[in-house]
Image: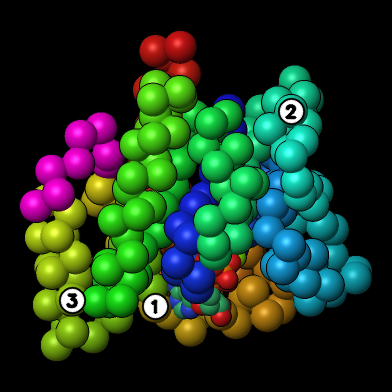
Amino acid sequence: MIISIVNEKGGSGKSTLAINLATEFKRINKDIILIDADPQRSIEHFLNFRDEKLELPFNSLSKLGETLAKEVKNLQEKYEIVIIDTGGRDSKEMRQALIISSIVIIPIVPSALDISVFEKMINIIEEAKIINESLIPLIVISRASPNPFLNKKISQLKEYLVKKNLKDFILSQNIIFEREAFRNTIFNGKGITEIDGDNKAKKDFLNFFEELNILLDNDLEQN
Ligand SMILES: Nc1ncnc2c1ncn2[C@@H]1O[C@H](COP(=O)(O)OP(=O)(O)OP(=O)(O)O)[C@@H](O)[C@H]1O
Ligand SMILES: [Mg+2]
């Protein structure tokens, strides 16, 4: 199962989500590898933040260039789940990831500027679906302000998505809010589910994780 995380708008929370997903899949004993397909090498930087005494939270590899699709397909024989984190721009890595994935997660920030460039992202995914017909695009609202006075932005984004009448796209029922804990854990080289106790960020993430797993199970049943 290949899951890619894309949005050519920078800073929408792709790498943070990729790291947290990979950490949690590994924690529940899935055979998982995280592919860093971004020349900025965010995953490598994240791992360098991690305490040397701790075990690695997941396996990872950096893969760039024309051969990404071919190499990832080979890895699929060794790993149950392959997650591809792509960079914040249109790239051959992003396009290739879309062609070989079962699910593409698109985190989008509820802001006017992010919404205005989302149109192109939708077109790219629709184009990929001509070749990769069974691709499931899963949009998740990301880095949304938890301030109730600002939740108009969330409803505006939802309205925009409804108006687009996107066929075959799924809008996640869960929202990943902007929470300090997401930033702090990354800075300590940890996934959000590696921290103890109750935490709003952890809850947001785990709700999304559960929703994703239901989608994965359904997809496996159908194929
Ligand atoms: N839910 C969140 N709450 C708070 N901060 C977040 C959240 N998600 C991401 N961030 C922070 O926002 C910044 C951008 O996040 P991240 O690097 O994950 O985005 P990205 O989409 O991978 O960016 P790029 O397009 O450059 O690859 C980082 O500083 C990260 O710590
Ligand atoms: Mg990134």
Residue at point 39%, 35% (across, down): 127
Q: Residue at x 14, y 60 (%)?
A: 160
Look at the image and say whether residue 52 sits in the magenta stretch. Answer: no
Q: Is residue 196 above or below residue 23?
A: below
Q: Which residue is mark 3?
A: 153
Which residue appears at 29% of the width and 56% of the height?
Answer: 119
In the displayed structure, 182 sits above or below 215; it is below
What distance separates the C-alpha of mark 1 from that of mark 2?
A: 35 Å
Say left or right for 126 vs 1.
left
Q: Quadrant of residue 112?
A: bottom left
Pick whichever, 13 or 25, lies toward us. 13
Q: Which residue is mark 1?
A: 178
Q: Residues within 10 Å of mark 2 (few under 14, many from 20)?
A: few
Horizontal side of 84 relative to 125 (left or right) equals: right
Task: Identify residue type, mark 1.
Answer: Glu
Which amino acid, mark 3?
A: Lys
